[in-house]
Image (cartoon, helix red, strand yellow):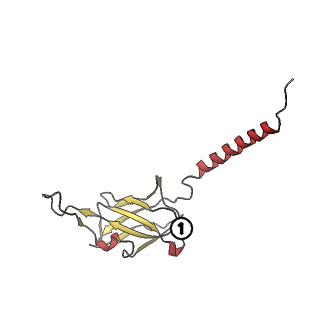
Amino acid sequence: MRQRPGRRQWRLISMFLFGFLGATLAGCGQGAGLVPVTGKVTVDGKPLGTGSVTFHPDTAKGNTAPQLAAGEIDAQGNYKLVSGAREGAPPGWYKVTVTAQEPADAKNPYAPPKSIVNPRFGDVQTSGLTVQVVGNPAPGAYDLSVTK
């Protein structure tokens, strides 16, 4: 004849089940809420073929995202944002910076690089670029235009 589980055994079983359920749900939530963000960066109307884009959460407009979202600019001027190790960014308002540099002197590897874009675009306080990340953006909503 089998013995029925006692109180202590039920408590251990329930702790295991709730712990397993909690861990499973927490794992499923990672990356939840991120929206794919892709765009094109142009400098004086032409694709910027190098550099990076960084989206800084704009707390003044209610964005409390815990981290930056950033992406590298490819040879055609396209970028795709990544937050941590996941593609996309949480919805909300962002201040945007764009940086791109090239060697100032190809013969001198120690020469400081020069900026391809106006340096103001590399500073979150002076870039003037703002974007709202939304679930269903209009085509070109995340395209950025900068100057030299």
Viewer-proximal residue, 14 or 76?
Answer: 14
> Residue 33 in the image: x percent, y percent?
56, 59
Quadrant in which residue 21 is drawn? top right
Packing grade of label 1 (10 A; few <14, some 14-19, many >=20) is few
Viewer-proximal residue, 113 or 45?
Answer: 113
Q: Which residue sits furthest top?
A: 1
Tag count: 1
> Residue 114 in the image: x percent, y percent?
22, 66
Question: Left of 88 or right of it: where is 14?
Answer: right
- The residue labelled by disc 1 is 64
> Residue 136 in the image: x percent, y percent?
53, 64
Question: Left of 109 or right of it: where is 6?
Answer: right
Residue type for callout 1: Thr
Q: Which residue sits furthest left?
A: 107
Q: Which residue sits furthest front?
A: 8
Quadrant in which residue 10 is drawn? top right
Screen quadrant of the C terminus:
bottom left
Q: Which residue sits furthest right?
A: 1
Viewer-proximal residue, 139 or 124?
Answer: 124
> Residue 36 in the image: x percent, y percent?
48, 58
Circle 1 SS class? loop
Image point 48% across, 71% down: which residue?
Answer: 58
Image point 49% across, 61% down: which residue?
Answer: 89
Screen quadrant of the N terminus:
top right
Question: Left of 75 or right of it: where is 79?
Answer: right
Image point 37% across, 68% down: which residue?
Answer: 97
